Image (cartoon, helix red, strand yellow):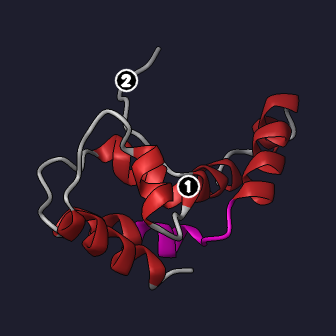
Amino acid sequence: MIKKSEPVSCAEVRDIISKLDEEQRESERAKRVLAYTKKFTSLSSEDAAKLRSELGELGLLKLKAEHIIKLIDIMPRDEEDIRKIFVDISLDQNEISQILETVKKYI
């Protein structure tokens, strides 16, 4: 039964899996998820949490929890990457610059 639903980054997923008991960690699903997160995640879970906090503190109303997680997982390097994430939302140049400056601290 699902008790709570909250978006988490791949780095945080890697940390969650490492805290499972051995039997759960050795399941085929956990192994595949862990392999995926290792392949596509460059941040530690601590850095991901810090970046999540910093992006949240920007105070951008258009920036929802789901968007923050996408930013952390993708780690956009330029405006075009950010625009691909926010296809359904129009961000002004100032908002894009704030996001890029924050993300670039962790690249």
Which residue corresponds to the image point at 42% horizontal and 56% vertical from the top-left? 82
* Type of amino acid under label 2: Lys
Quadrant the C terminus occupies: bottom right
Q: Check disc 1 and report its element: helix, strand or loop.
A: helix
Up/down of 55 relative to 5, above or below? below
Please provide percent x and percent y for residue 93: 23, 65
Residue 73: image tag? 1
Residue closest to the eye, 16 or 98: 98
Up/down of 17 relative to 52, above or below? above
Up/down of 75 relative to 12, above or below? below
**Does 69 lie within the magenta span?**
no
Does residue 55 appear in this view? yes
**Does 43 lie within the magenta span?**
yes
Please provide percent x and percent y for residue 101: 35, 80
Left or right: 27 in relation to 62: right
Left or right: 85 in relation to 88: right
Q: Label 2, on which residue?
A: 3
Left or right: 19 in relation to 83: right
Which residue corresponds to the image point at 72% horizontal and 45% vertical from the top-left? 21
The magenta-colored residue range is 41-49
Residue closest to the eye, 78 or 55: 78
